[in-house]
Image: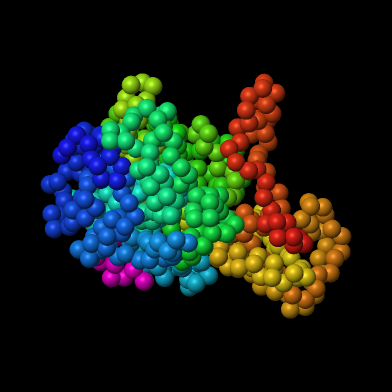
Amino acid sequence: MSAYCTLAAGQVDYGAAAGSAFVDPATIDRGIPTPSSVIGHEVGEKAVRYDPMMRYFEALAASSDRIVLKPYGETHEGRTLVHLFITSPKNHQRLDQIKENNEKLTDPRKLANAAAGTELIKNHPAIALMAYAVHGDELSSTDAAMQLAYQLVAGIDDGTKSLLEQVVTIIDPLQNPDGRERYLASIEQRTGLISATDGQHIQHNAGNGRTNHYRFDMNRDGAALVTKENQARMKVITAWNPHFTIDSHEMGSLDTYLMDPPRQPLNPLYSEKDLYWRELFGFEQGAAFDEHGWSYYAKDWNTDFAAIYTGSWAGGAISLLYEQAGVNSAAFKLETGHLLTYRESVHHHLVSSLANLNTLKNNRLEILGEYYAEHLAAVNGDDELTGTFLMPPHADRARMSRFITLLDLNAIEYGFAQESVRISGATDIWGNKTEALELPVGTLVVKSAQPHRRVVHIFLSFDIRPDNDYLKIEREELEKGEESRLYDVTAWNFPMAYGLESYW
């Protein structure tokens, strides 16, 4: 291979300098096409473009009964969004049954009794949704997704076979292809014959690819679901109800790697079990990094309070964040003198993904049991989260219709009052207690006793607040002249945003 390549961006092939393969060739089925045989370069040599990536996934799907390629949507620029369903051939034969059984675990009202769910779990695989590159200019995770798919499909070792038997892995390799293509075109125009490793170079300060075609940050659209891409994605999430999800990103080039768990403030709708699992998954992910001698950290700026991201955790999934230092498809010299290559950044995401999938496999029965117990408690509705939200009809029917569409997209159950409703002692949207009140026929009724109970509260609660222990720390920091520890928005109220009257 030449010292530098003139394909796409003219980058020095820093990736090849890493030398070793991502996976032991002895554990791979040579009959499965490698990514390089289709895309024309090694994984991690440079960022793969959308069209070669799609050609590879089509070739991979045609080569094995471990994988099915399923389109789920389309971007504004006409690029197809796809999911890769990867599991054992035996699981593929019963994939519809797995989906149906998982619906029963999510909604235990569909089971004959509670014991039926416990019995069902014994032979039910865990479902993982691995989502990469919602920000188009955060490049490395898509290449990692491609290598992950290859290793899961081609792996012949016992570990891979066991993983395939116990987990259905749904890979969303590129959530924002429009942004990625825009960004890679910009990098190509700013890269010389020899790639620069200095972060001050124009090559490392390319145009904006973070957003979709309409310059909308889809990572802030996980709840409002304004974008067509996220609407399509949410339909898959609510159809499959994954038990585990990851959201893979990049951050500043001078950083290392951020993984779970998060720090305060956390959304109070988290349970202790949520946090336990995020600690465990993060610990085992970190242990995998230790084997390679890689730097990483947790908590720090990673808070999880705002209900604006994918929101899978609110539906019952264990949901993790990946943040890798970005190098813009090339290499970046750090202050320590270490040369962080694109290949290494891809490798970090790959190792993270495999570590987390194995943690999911090894704890499958316990995770599924807790998932089922959470949803059983939700539909039984016998705790402090139990109640009813009431929203009288609005004069603007189109606005009310859009609000109801949002409930549908998030699989929130609702109904309409067939006669007037008398209430007293309810709390209104401003937090005030009401006296006796009569709401008219057609009032929108949302009972919290339903499978996605926490999603109901995320959307309809009037004032979700950080806990007092965190607020004390926040005040102390501010009084010392330090910055706020908050990362994102702290207030949201969807009924108010839609101009609706609402009561709880």
Horizontal and vertical percent position of residue 76: 48, 61
Q: Is residue 394 above or below residue 150?
A: below
Identify which residue is drawn at 53% across, 44% down. Answer: 272
Is residue 1 rendered to the left or right of residue 191? left
Q: Is residue 92 one of those drawn in magenta?
A: yes
Identify which residue is drawn at 70% across, 67% down. Answer: 399
The C terminus, quarter of image: bottom right
Identify which residue is drawn at 50% across, 59% down. Answer: 230
Horizontal and vertical percent position of residue 209: 46, 47
Is residue 150 rendered to the left or right of residue 129? left
Q: In the displayed image of the protein, which residue is found farthest to the bottom?
A: 418
The N terminus, quarter of image: top left
Q: Is residue 284 above or below residue 165?
A: above
**Nearest to the observer: residue 57 or residue 274:** 57
Horizontal and vertical percent position of residue 315: 52, 57
Is residue 291 rendered to the left or right of residue 418? left
Characterize the magenta stretch by its predominant secondary structure: helix
Horizontal and vertical percent position of residue 215: 53, 51
Give the quadrant of residue 423. bottom right
Q: Is residue 8 above or below residue 302?
A: below
> Magenta part of the protein: which range?
86-96
Q: Is residue 136 visible?
A: no
Identify which residue is drawn at 24% across, 53% down. Answer: 39
